Image (tube, helix red, strand yellow):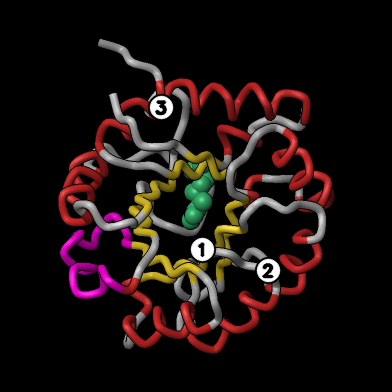
Amino acid sequence: MTSRPIRIAPSILSADFGRLAEEVAAIDAAGADYIHVDIMDGHFVPNISFGPAVMASVRQVTQKPFDVHLMVAPVDPYIAAFAKAGADVITVHAEAGPHLHRTLQAIRAEGKNAGVAINPGTPVSAVEAVLDDIDLLLVMSVNPGFGGQAFIPGTLDKLRQARALVGNRPIEIEVDGGITADNARAVADAGATVFVAGSSVFGGNETQTYPHRIAAIRSAATTRTA
Ligand SMILES: O=C(CO)[C@H](O)[C@H](O)COP(=O)(O)O
């Protein structure tokens, strides 16, 4: 059993966009640790979500940290806008290039925590050279672009590799895609500490169930099974 603190980050990609502020307030009240914000550009990934103006608007309804995942290329022109819109952590893709180190420095220069994400087809070694420049490593457990996809089992090995690579550095290891109460235990054992969950939190429209869904993932991730 891991003794590391577990954080649950519901992805508002799966929320009802027509009631987005209400949805953010609901997951805050339901016990979310972070609000995970997926920004998709229709170029780096085959889907478009929303931009900094929408994020700034919903930022006003919660004090919880905003964990912003930029699936955007080129990304450098948008760092300042999302920092200003209220991001606390800004994560960019290692594959979005070409100047990852410069991008991470730009995030920290905005006074924000810097994260780097790797797609399922990218080895963990791709981030080795920037370990001193990141606060969070996001291991994608689906190919980015859409919510509701199935967890890719090979991610567990990548998480173990990521945990070994990070060592004692103060870097959160986040997992994103297909996370449910059923796989949270294995994902935690493999080394993840931040759990992004979209459809398993927002799977229905009944906001009163959000506390139970978040608690179920947290409980599974933190409960000893052996
Ligand atoms: O980054 C993402 C997709 O690119 C989403 O955050 C991710 O897929 C979460 O959704 P779900 O929990 O439904 O898989």
Q: Name the residue under label 1.
A: 69
The verdict on residue 124 being magenta is: yes
Q: Does the residue labelled 1 lie within 8 Å of ligand 1?
A: yes
Q: Regarding mark 3 in the picture, which secondary structure is present there?
A: helix
Q: Mark 3 points at which residue?
A: 221
Kind of residue at badge 3: Ala
Q: Name the one closer to the observer, 189 or 126.
A: 189
- Give the quadrant of residue 9: top right
- Contact between marks 2 and 1 (CB within 8 A): the answer is no
- Please report the residue visible at 59 percent of the width from the left and 48 percent of the height from the top: 34
- Please report the residue visible at 81 percent of the width from the left and 65 percent of the height from the top: 57
Kind of residue at badge 1: His
Boundaries of the magenta span: 118-132
* Residue 60 horizontal side relative to residue 8, left or right: right
Residue 194: image location, x then y, percent: 44, 44
Residue 81: image location, x then y, percent: 65, 81
Q: Name the residue under label 2.
A: 86
Label 1 and label 3: CA atoms lie apart by 22 Å
Q: Which of marks 1 and 3 is nearer the N terminus?
A: 1
Kind of residue at badge 2: Gly
* Residue 219 horizontal side relative to residue 50, left or right: left
Residue 61 sits above or below residue 52 on the image:
above
